[in-house]
Amino acid sequence: MNIPEDEATGSAVTQLTAQLTRDLLVVQGAGSHLHTTWHPPTHATVGGRVLPAEPRTITI
């Protein structure tokens, strides 16, 4: 399909952290590192370093 994807998906990683109820270190894409922290009972935060994505143009 040749659909470009995000280099790193923080929203997905925070949901995974909440489901697993623990902190995570996720390496994603071409070398992005996302660190999540679980804050019981219901919150997760994310931070880290990501590589820049190529610019895209979307026509609707």
Image (spheres, helix red, strand yellow):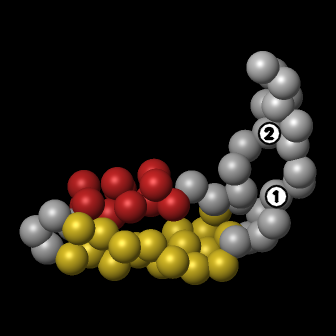
> Left or right: 10 with respect to 14?
right
Q: Of helix, strand and loop, which one carries label 2?
A: loop
Q: Which residue reaches farthest left?
A: 41
Residue at position x 82%, y 31% from top? 58
Depicted 22 relative to depicted 7: above or below: below
Q: Using the rendered view, name the quadrant where residue 17 is placed.
A: bottom left
User: Can you see residue 51?
Assistant: yes
Q: Which residue is mark 1?
A: 53
- Amino acid type at mark 1: Ala
Mark 1, secondary structure of its residue: loop
Marks 2 and 1, how far apart at CA = 9 Å
Q: Mark 1 or mark 2, which is nearer the start of the sequence?
A: 2
Q: Give whichever of 39, 28 is nearer the camera.
A: 39
In the image, what residue type sits under mark 2?
A: Pro
Left or right: 53 as drawn, with respect to 29: right
Question: Residue 8 at what x, y percent from top left?
Answer: 63, 59
For the point 21% across and 77% down, the residue is 39
As displayed, is residue 11 above or below residue 33? above
Residue 9 horizontal side relative to residue 45, left or right: right
CB contact under 8 Å: marks 2 and 1: yes
Q: Quadrant of residue 59?
A: top right
Q: Quadrant of the C terminus?
A: top right
- Dot 2, how many residues are within 10 Å of its Cα: few (below 14), some (14-19), or many (20+)? few
Closer to the camera, 58 or 35? 58
Residue 22 visible? The answer is no
Compared to residue 37, the image places residue 53 above or below, namely: above
Q: Where residue 45 sits in the image (x, y, percent)?
A: 37, 73
Residue visible at 72% across and 43% down in the picture = 5
Which residue matches tag 2?
Answer: 4
Residue 52 screen position, x and y as percent: 81, 66
Please tell me in which quadrant of the rendered image residue 57 appears. top right
